[in-house]
Image: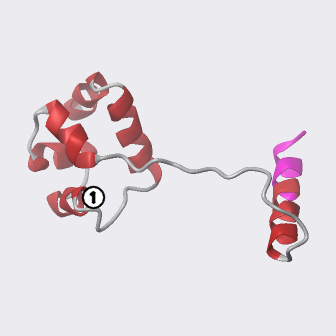
Amino acid sequence: MSIFDELQTSLQEAVEIKQGEAQASRITRHEVADVRAIRAKLHVSQAEFAEAMGTSVDTIKSWETKRRNPTGLAAKVLATIQDNPAFFNELALH
């Protein structure tokens, strides 16, 4: 099945769910990374973490207080760091 076919099938399923004609066959949930816990495990400051992540200290603070959630690439990088803390060292070098 091509990517187009998969997208078309998914879109049709979404329309049917919206119209009440079907129930979702799967629900995907992504766990939001605990940024404060990750940073504490790495023993780095908010400023050091922000620099390695390529973001501002205010963004790190927002993530840590759960005012905002990391999305997109930031969420993927955080999940990678959570699973493999040594990745942070590689990230911090660049």
Does residue 55 lie above or below 17 as drawn? above
Does residue 51 lie above or below 42 as drawn? below
Residue at x-position 17% and y-position 63%: 58
Does residue 1 lie above or below 4 as drawn? above
Q: Which amino acid does label 1 sit on?
A: Trp
Q: What stretch is highlighted in magenta?
A: 1-8
Q: In which quarter of the image is the C terminus?
A: top left
The answer to if 92 sits in the magenta stretch is: no
Residue at x-position 24% and y-position 38%: 38
Residue for badge 1: 63
* Type of colouring: secondary structure
At numbered mark 1, what does the secondary structure look like: helix, strand or loop?
helix
Nearer-the-camera pick, 38 or 54: 38
Q: Position of residue 28 (x, y in %)?
A: 63, 50
Residue at x-position 44% and y-position 42%: 76
Report the side of 5 relative to 58 (left or right): right
Q: Position of residue 78 (x, y in %)?
A: 35, 41
